[in-house]
Amino acid sequence: MSSLPTWAMWLIAAAALLSPVLAFLLAIAAEIVIGALWDADMLKPPALAAAVAISWSWFRKLWDRPHGRAAVET
């Protein structure tokens, strides 16, 4: 017997195959929200804040140093 049920293996495979599609749809949704805020002339600062918040949430994992590693000293 395997340690994972069959449905779990299919779910993992589907998530791996659909992750680029979901990331693309998320980017389109973010663009729609930012565009809608930008088109409303009085909401330009909130549109900028929304763009910054979305970008920060996407890239914050890239900025983090992996835990458990010592800092590099030169």
Image (tube, helix red, strand yellow):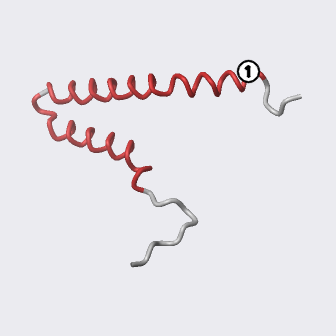
What residue is shown at x 45% (from left), y 26% (from top)?
A: 20
Q: Residue 66's x, y, as percent? A: 51, 59
Judging by the rendered image, the residue that carries numbered circle 1 is 7
Position of residue 52 in the picture relative to residue 8 (left or right)? left
Q: Is residue 36 left or right of residue 55?
A: left
Is residue 62 shown left or right of residue 19? left
Q: Quadrant of residue 43?
A: top left
Density class for disc 1 (Cα within 10 Å; few <14, some 14-19, many ≥20) is few
Most foreground residue, 16 or 74: 74
Q: Which residue corresponds to the image point at 38% horizontal and 25% vertical from the top-left?
A: 24
Establish if 2 lies above or below 70: above
In the rendered image, the vertical position of residue 63 relative to residue 42, given as above or below: below
Q: Quadrant of the N terminus?
A: top right
Residue extending farthest to the right is 1
Tell me where residue 74 appears, x and y as whole percent. 39, 78
Residue sitting at x 79%, y 25%: 5
51 or 6, nearer to the observer? 6
Q: Label 1 is placed on what type of residue?
A: Trp
